[in-house]
Amino acid sequence: MNHDIHTASIPRVGMFATVRNRRGIISAVEPFDGDRGRLHLVHIEYKDDQLPHND
């Protein structure tokens, strides 16, 4: 059985993330069921001295 389904990895707490050229750690993940299926609201704590410190 051959399936051509694109699967994205689900973000998990503790994973590293790069957002707008800044490195951070995922501090929380909240699932959200929207019109296009399940999405994830991800909270990131940046590990540099720039502002904001989190998103």
Image (cartoon, helix red, strand yellow):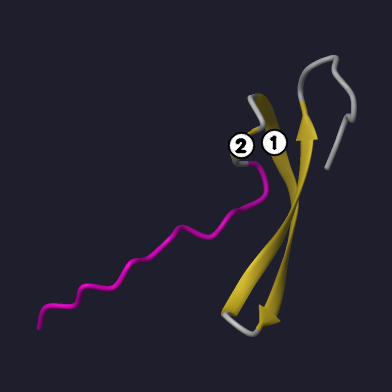
Most extreme residue toward the top is: 49
Picture quadrant of residue 35: bottom right
Which quadrant of the rendered structure holds the N terminus?
bottom left
Identified by mark 2, the residue type is Ala
Q: Which of 22 and 24 is in front in this view?
A: 22
> Seen in the image, is 22 located left or right of residue 51?
left
Picture quadrant of residue 22: top right
Give me the residue at 19% from left, 78% from top: 3
> Seen in the image, is 40 located left or right of residue 36?
right
Residue 41, horizontal then vertical, whole percent: 73, 61
Q: Residue 43 carries which label?
A: none
Q: Give the range drawn in magenta.
A: 1-14
Give me the residue at 60% from left, 41% from top: 15
Pointer 2: what residue? Answer: 17
What element does badge 2 sit on? strand
Q: Is residue 21 magenta?
A: no
Pointer 1: what residue? Answer: 25
Mark sitting earlier along the chain (1/2):
2
Residue 5, horizontal then vertical, whole percent: 28, 73
Is 40 rendered above or below residue 51? below
Q: Is residue 8 magenta?
A: yes
Identified by mark 1, the residue type is Ile
